[in-house]
Image (cartoon, rainbow, N blue to C red):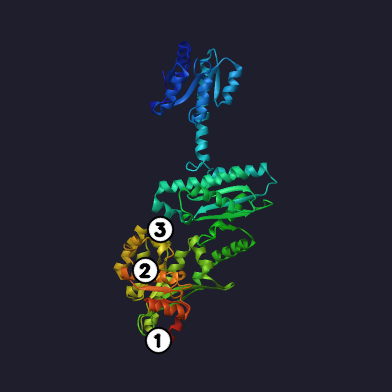
């Protein structure tokens, strides 16, 4: 009588051309397992191929007419089924045992079957070993790509170092930039094809040069390979595999590498360095490869210093908020109509720290929301001061990041500081980047619509640098388009750059919103933009970002 829980009952297929042998084994096996029979190799393969039959193990006689046990083993091996079902061969010949094991058999039983407890023990043992092996394999390899999982990758990389102690190895991180957008635009199934193709490209490099590879997470891969002088080899191999799925202009690969000839750094730290190198070119158009070097090591120490000093900088108000004026140029005379709040850090030891050094760092480390809210509060207070001291209202726009919008209390926070300072919401404008809209459009549109309903004006910042479609623009709640400064560079009368600017202006006109051009530095740029119908200009041509007290000069000049 079988004692196994029927819900998890396992079936053993007994394959033997002699009925008496099938009966003997069946009587022994059925005390613990469900039993099925096949009288020859052909019938056995039919039952194995029927996936619904749920076979957990096969007892396979070697000597059978027409299709022998060896033939069955070879076919199962060719089809990859030996990785799904363990096979124990039945034989009385020692040579057959050895050959069967070479063909992938899990174990063997020797005829005649005179000890039932031994047979059951070996069946049970083979099943347990097979199940344990499958569990290990499931965690050892990434299911989608077949590369090592992160845990096993580092385990095998350590073993690789032990085996080849003198081999100079490179820690390499490969990433597909903005992969989440590809998933949204073309679907997860297509995204999986991209990841599989990337894995195949990386695998081809491993097969050629040695080493191992793994998938870290999502769209990021690890490779531990003998030192290469040219990492472009890896990029090219991946691009070759992606070429049938994506246009060259659609692939955005990044690679970071760290080479340690002495292996003086721990393995995990070496990959941290490679990952840092990879991330450092995240927003650098045209750059695909970055190698961690002494300069990056110095930057790492510098960044650690900034992170450590962040809280004190907030408390001591080391962060200063400057304001860059925006001028309305639609009339005969440019008039100051608003300003953008821009943060500056005056560090007590390091002096002036450039925003492009600390803002990306705080974004990566989750501190940017606290910094942004500091700027928001200071800006609200400043609008109120200008009202009191200058007798005029200078609306201010503050930057709102994708991370800020994810905070559930963002709208409440802004509403609170506006009320505390006695402001009208239309005096407190919000700049949200185009890329933020495209990364989580549904949630962001909902938040923005709520803010607009409260009276705030919304400017889409860096327009033209993201991936929004013209169709998306029609559903995006905005009050102004802020043209990315990259559009302004190199504009000349009649050139392609100027044609693009004209196109943006036409899009804005269709949407019924004004255009703000930032980064305007020369009179030629100013005149071209004014003639083309641009509404508002911001840039060094009129003023750099300045301290709030300097705004008095604009009132004195009659520009407010």
Residue 160's spot in the image, x, y percent? 64, 43
**As drawn, is 478 to the left or to the right of 484?**
left
Q: Secondary structure at mark 1?
A: helix
Q: Quadrant of the C terminus?
A: bottom left
Q: Is residue 543 visible?
A: no
Circle 2 or circle 3, nearest the eye? 3
Q: Residue at x 59, y 56 (%)?
A: 273
Question: What residue is disc 3 on?
Answer: 439
| Residue 309 locus on image (x, y percent) | 55, 67
**Residue 553 placement (x, y as % from top left):** 44, 86
Mark 2 or 1: in front is 1
The answer for how far apart the CA atoms under marks 2 and 3 are is 22 Å
Q: Quadrant of residue 399?
A: bottom left
Q: Secondary structure at mark 3?
A: helix
Q: Upstream in the sequence, badge 2 or badge 1? A: 2
Badge 1 density bin: few <14, some 14–19, many ≥20, Cα 10 Å? some
Contact between marks 1 and 3 (CB within 8 A): the answer is: no
Q: In this figure, which residue is indicated by the disc labeled 2?
A: 414
Q: First in sequence, mark 1 or 3: give its number.
A: 3
Horizontal and vertical percent for residue 354? Answer: 54, 71
Query: Which dot marks residue 257?
Result: none
Residue tagged 1: 555
Q: Quadrant of the N terminus?
A: top left
Can residue 162 be seen here? yes
Vertical side of 176 occupied by 81: above or below: above
Residue 47 relative to residue 87: left or right:
left
Secondary structure found at label 2: helix
| Along the viewing direction, whichever of 523 and 29 lies nearer the viewer | 523
Per the model, the C-alpha gap separating discs 1 and 3 is 41 Å
In the picture as drawn, the residue positioned furthest to the left comes out as: 453
């Amino acid at each position: 009588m079988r004692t196994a829980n029927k819900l998890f009952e396992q079936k053993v297929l007994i394959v033997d051309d002699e009925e008496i042998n099938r009966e003997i084994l069946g009587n022994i096996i059925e005390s613990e397992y469900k039993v099925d029979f096949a009288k020859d190799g052909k019938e056995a393969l039919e039952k194995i191929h029927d996936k619904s039959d749920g076979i957990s193990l096969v007892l396979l006689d070697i000597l059978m007419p027409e299709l022998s046990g060896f033939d069955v083993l070879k076919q199962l091996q060719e089809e990859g089924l030996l990785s799904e079902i363990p096979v124990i061969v039945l034989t009385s010949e020692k040579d057959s045992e050895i050959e069967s094991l070479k063909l992938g058999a899990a174990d063997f039983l020797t005829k005649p079957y005179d000890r039932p407890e031994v047979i059951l023990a070996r069946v049970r043992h083979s099943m347990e070993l097979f199940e344990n092996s499958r569990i290990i394999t499931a965690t050892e390899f990434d299911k989608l790509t077949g590369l090592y999982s992160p845990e096993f990758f580092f385990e095998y990389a350590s073993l690789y170092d032990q085996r080849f102690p003198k081999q100079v190895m490179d820690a390499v991180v490969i990433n597909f930039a903005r992969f989440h957008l590809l998933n949204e635009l073309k679907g997860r199934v297509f995204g999986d094809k991209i990841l599989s193709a990337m894995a195949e490209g990386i695998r081809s490099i491993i097969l050629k040069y040695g080493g191992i590879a793994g998938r870290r997470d999502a769209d990021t891969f690890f490779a531990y390979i003998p030192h290469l002088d040219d990492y472009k080899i890896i990029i090219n191999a991946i691009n070759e595999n992606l070429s049938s799925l994506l246009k060259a202009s659609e692939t955005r690969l990044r690679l970071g590498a760290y080479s340690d000839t002495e292996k003086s750094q721990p393995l995990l730290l070496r990959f941290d360095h490679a990952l840092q190198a990879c991330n450092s070119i995240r927003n650098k158009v045209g750059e695909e490869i970055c190698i961690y070097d002494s300069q990056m090591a110095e930057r790492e120490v510098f960044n650690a210093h900034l992170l450590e000093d962040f809280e004190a900088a907030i408390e001591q108000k080391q962060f200063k908020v400057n304001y860059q004026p925006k001028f309305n140029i639609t009339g005969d005379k440019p008039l100051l109509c608003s300003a953008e709040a821009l943060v500056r850090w005056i560090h007590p030891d390091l002096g002036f720290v450039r925003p492009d050094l600390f803002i990306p760092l705080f974004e990566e480390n989750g501190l940017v929301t606290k910094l942004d809210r500091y700027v928001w509060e200071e800006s609200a207070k400043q609008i109120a001061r200008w009202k009191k001291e200058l007798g005029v209202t200078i609306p201010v726009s503050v930057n709102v990041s994708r991370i800020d919008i994810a905070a559930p209390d963002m709208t409440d926070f802004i509403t609170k500081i506006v009320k505390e300072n006695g402001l009208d919401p239309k005096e407190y404008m919000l700049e949200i980047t185009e890329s933020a809209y495209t990364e989580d459009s549904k949630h962001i549109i909902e938040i923005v619509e709520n803010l607009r309903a409260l009276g705030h004006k919304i400017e889409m910042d860096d327009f033209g640098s993201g991936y929004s479609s013209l169709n998306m623009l029609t559903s995006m709640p905005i009050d102004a388009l802020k043209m990315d400064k990259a559009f302004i560079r190199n504009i000349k009368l009649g050139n392609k750059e100027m044609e693009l600017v004209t196109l943006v202006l036409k899009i804005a006109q269709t949407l019924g919103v004004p255009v703000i051009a930032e980064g305007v530095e020369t009179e030629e740029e100013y005149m071209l933009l004014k003639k083309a119908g641009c509404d508002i200009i911001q840039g060094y041509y009129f003023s750099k970002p300045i301290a709030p007290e300097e705004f008095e000069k604009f009132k004195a000049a009659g520009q407010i």
